[in-house]
Amino acid sequence: MKKGFSRTWRALLPWPRPPGGERYAVCHFCDTLHQSFPVDEGTAARCARCGALLYQNRPASLARASAFSLAALLLMALVHVFPFLTMDAATMRRDLTLVGAATALMEQDAPILGTAIILFTMITPLMLAGGMIYVCLPLMFGRAAPGAGHAAKWMYRSEPWNMVEVFLLGVLVSLMKLAKVADVHFGIGFWAFAGVMLCMAGAVAGIDREELWDRLEVAKG
Amino acid sequence: MSAPLPKAADVGLAGCHTCGKVSPVSLKHCPRCGTHLHLRKPASIEGTIALMAAAAALFIPSHLLPVMTVVELGETTHNTIIGGMMTFWRTGAYPIAIVIFTASILIPFLKIAALSWLCLAATGRVHPSPAALGRIYWFTELLGRWSMIDIFVVGILVSVVQLGNYMAITPGPGALAFAGVVVLTMFAAMRFEPRLLWDRLDELPATPPPNPTKPAS
C-alpha cells in the first residue's frame, strides 16, 4: 500500500490488506490453518486439505455489491405495489401480494405462519440488501458508516433465512393448484420478485465476506 | 497425503464465525467484529440432537394433521400435504407432485437422517470418507430452506381463495407443525460443528479399528 494515498483512493484499490503482521485464514469446514496471501481478481483460494472455499477476489466488488443491492431494494418496492397473481373466479377478482398473504394468515388464526412469511420474504431480504448497501456504499468512498460492523454482522446472519426463491416456487405451485378452479395470471410483482432474487444473489456473490471485513477494518483504522 | 497440515485449534487460534479473522482464542471476543470466539461450537452435538429430535417429533403431526381446510359450496375437506401431492399425481401434474414430494417429505427426512449420520461420525461411531461428509454437510446446509415451500403455498392459497360462499381456504394446524420442522432442522444444521468430523479423522490412524479383518463401514 502506497503512503500518501487518500482514503478515497485506497478504497478504489483492489482488496486492501489490513495493517498488522502475518495474516492467516482458517478453513471453516476442517479448521486447517493457512497463510493468507492476496489472489488475483477473479480467482479464489481453496483449502489445501478439503478443497472448501477460503476466500475469493471478486472484480469491482464494492460497486457490484452496491449496485445489485440498490436494484434489489428498488424491485422490492415494486413487489409491494403490484400483485404476484391475479385470479378471476365467479365474478370475483383476487390479488396476491406478500402483505396480503401475511395478513390473510394472521386473520385466519395463524399469526405465527403470517409472521414467518413477513420474516422470510420481507424482513430478511430487506436486511440483506439494506445492510449490504449501508456497508458497501460508504466503503466505496473509503469510509465506514456508523455501526457498519453491526450491520455487516446482522446482514450475514440473516442470509440463510432469506427465502425469496422458495416463495417464488411456492407461487408457481399455487398457480398450478388454482389453474383448475379459476383464471389466473402472473402479475408484475412476480417478475419483480424474480428480479429481487437475481439481484440478491448478485449482491451476495459480488463481494467476498473476508474482503468486506478487511475493507471495513482498513476504513475504520 | 503429504505432511500433515496444521490445525488452527492446535496452536490456539480460532477463525471468527462472523468475519473470518483469525485470532488467539484467549482473546474471548473477535477484535474485528466482537463475536464470541471458540475453537469449536460449544455443545454442538447435544444441541444438534435436541433440535433434530424436536423436528422429528413434529414431523409426524405435520403430515397427519391438515395443512389447510377447503370449504367449497358448503362442503368441507381437510387437506394434508401428502393428500395434496396425491391429487397432483392423479391429475397428471407429475412435476408439481415431485416438487412437493421432494420439498415436504424427502428433504426433511433426508436432512434428519443426514444430520444423525453426521452426529454419529462426529462422535466416532462411523468412519465415512471426508468427501462424502463434505457433500452431506453441504446438502443439509443448502437444501433445508426449500421445505418452506409448503408453508408459502398455504399462505398464498389462504390469501387468494377467499371467494365468500363459493370457496374459502383456511390454514390448518399441520402447517404450523411443518413450519416448526423446517425452522428446527435449519437451526440443527447451523448448530452442527463440521470441524468435529475432521478432528475424528485425525484420530483414526492413532486408534486402529479393534477388529482389522472386519473394518467398520
Image (cartoon, grey):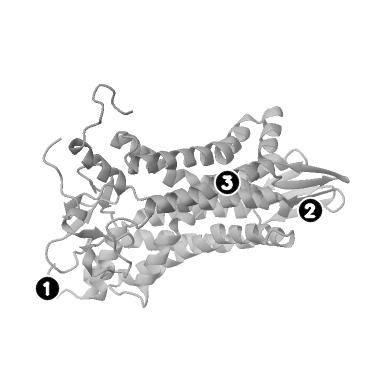
Instruction: Report crowding for label 2: few under 14, some 14 to 19, many 20 or more residues within 10 A (C-alpha).
Output: some
Dot 1: chain letter: A
Q: Quadrant of residue B131?
A: top left
3D distance between C-alphas at marks 2 and 1: 67 Å
Q: Can residue A98 be seen in this view?
A: no
Which residue type carries mark 3? Ala
Q: Where, quadrant-wise, is the N terminus of chain B in this rendering?
A: top left
Which residue type carries mark 1? Lys
Residue under the image location 38 percent in, 66 percent down: A153
Circle number at residue B57: 3
Lateral position of residue A136 relative to residue A119, left or right: left
Residue under the image location 67 percent in, 48 percent down: B174
**Residue B213: x %, y % from top left:** 25, 21
**Residue A21: x %, y % from top left:** 11, 65
Q: In which quarter of the image is residue B19?
A: bottom left
Residue tagged 2:
B162
- First-in-chain label (2 vs 3): 3
Residue tagged 1:
A3
Residue under the image location 78 percent in, 46 percent down: B70
Circles 2 and 1 on the same chain: no
**Residue A198: x %, y % from top left:** 47, 51
- Label 2's element? loop
- Judge whether A128 appears above or below A183 on screen: below
Residue under the image location 34 percent in, 43 percent down: B123
